[in-house]
Image (cartoon, rainbow, N blue to C red):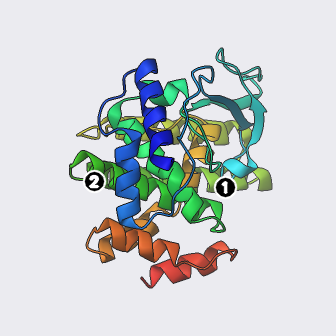
């Protein structure tokens, strides 16, 4: 029954965009061999659902630690109704949202093979690590998404390594601007000086990421948006990526070992407790 549902989803997918290999059923096979429990994600396609349109925004001198602390409104395919003169805005047409039964959206079906092959195991891995702190869970799902996709495509997991570089760039910029904004709130620097430093840091980050070669095939090496909203959003994924990558490296870059070690992390604990556990693996 499960196989027939997956096959039907693949046929509908082909009706939408004629998805390239590996199809979703292939990705699910790799997931199972790596130790994933089955999910009901991507068992059906919904051609009427283009994407999940979200508008994240925050103040010009505000830098939340993660997407959870960004302001959020629903968007449309035309973008966001948010004053971008007052706020830093990131418009995100999301291809999939981890729910345990998320469908194949039109944008996911239309995505490149590399992007689709990363998104599917990323969302499926969220179901395996429910209860981990969000920033650790996002880093872990991102890493496992890259490595599972590479296994399904029978390729080296180059994007897993490239994202480590992005994480280091984003985390440096985040720490610098976080310190600047705190100084501005204390009155140690003026608003004008803080905004000037913000522009310098973001411009330098965009210049640095643009020089990365080779380019990743399944993610944007630069910020989702070159402002505080994009930086805070990406920081959710990058903050603990070097830590989970160290687990992957300690496993000899073996997918099954990496999945097992991350899935064994304590649940419903504070970030520092989970990070301490992962740091010993």
Could you tell me residue 210's position as x and y percent? Answer: 34, 34
Picture coordinates of residue 17 (x, y %)?
A: 41, 20
**Horizontal side, residue 94 vs residue 108: left or right:** right
* Residue in the picture at 55% in, 46% down: 234
The foreground one among 74 and 221 is 74
Q: What element carries label 2?
A: helix
Query: Can you give x and y, in whole percent of width and height, for residue 5 in the image?
Result: 51, 40
Q: Are marks 2 and 1 in contact (CB under 8 Å)?
A: no
Name the residue nearer the viewer: 140 or 148. 148
> In this view, which residue lies farthest toward the front?
1
**Residue 124 versus residue 206 in the image, above or below:** below
Residue furthest bottom as drawn: 280
Q: Earlier in the sequence, mark 2 or mark 1?
A: 1
Residue 22: numbered disc: none
Tell whether 272 sits left or right of 55.
left
Structural distance between the alpha carbons of marks 2 and 1: 32 Å
| Mark in the foreground, 2 or 1 | 2
**Crowding near the residue tagged with mark 2, few <14, some 14–19, many ≥20 C-alpha atoms within 10 Å:** some
Residue at the image position 26 percent from the left and 50 percent from the top: 158
* Relative to 265, residue 38 above or below: above
Q: Mark 2 points at which residue?
A: 151
Q: Position of residue 88 (x, y in %)?
A: 68, 32
Of residues 263 and 101, the one drawn nearer to the viewer in this rendering: 101
Q: Is residue 259 in view? A: yes
Question: In the shown orientation, is residue 30 left or right of residue 37?
Answer: left
The residue at the point 64 percent across, 17 percent down is: 77
Q: Quadrant of residue 226?
A: top right
Residue 268, placed above or below residue 210: below
Residue on which disc 1 sits:
65
Say how many tags the image has: 2
């Amino acid at each position: 029954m499960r196989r027939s549902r997956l096959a039907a989803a693949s046929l509908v997918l082909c009706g939408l965009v004629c998805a390239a290999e590996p199809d979703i059923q292939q990705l699910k096979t790799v997931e199972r061999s790596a130790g994933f429990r089955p999910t009901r994600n991507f068992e059906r396609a919904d051609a009427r659902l283009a994407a999940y349109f979200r508008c994240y925004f925050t103040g010009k001198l505000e830098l939340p630690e993660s997407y959870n602390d960004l302001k959020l409104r629903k968007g449309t395919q035309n973008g966001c109704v948010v004053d971008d003169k007052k706020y830093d805005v990131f418009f995100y047409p999301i291809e999939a949202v981890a729910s345990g039964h998320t469908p194949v959206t039109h944008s996911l079906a239309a995505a490149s093979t590399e992007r689709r092959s990363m998104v599917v195991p990323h969302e499926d891995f969220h179901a395996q690590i429910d209860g981990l702190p969000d920033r650790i869970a996002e880093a872990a799902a991102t890493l496992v998404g890259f490595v599972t996709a590479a296994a399904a495509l029978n390729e080296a997991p180059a994007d897993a390594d490239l994202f480590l570089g992005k994480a280091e760039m984003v985390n440096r910029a985040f720490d610098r601007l976080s310190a600047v904004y705190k100084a501005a709130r204390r009155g140690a620097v003026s608003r004008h000086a803080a905004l000037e430093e913000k522009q310098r840091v973001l411009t330098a980050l965009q210049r640095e990421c643009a020089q990365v070669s080779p380019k990743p095939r399944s993610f944007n090496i630069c910020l989702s948006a070159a402002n505080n909203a994009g930086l805070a959003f990406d920081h959710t994924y990058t903050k603990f990526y070097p830590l989970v990558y160290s687990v992957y490296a300690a496993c000899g870059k073996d997918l099954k070992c990496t999945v097992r070690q991350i899935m064994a992390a304590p649940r419903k604990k504070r970030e520092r407790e989970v990070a301490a556990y992962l740091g010993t693996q």
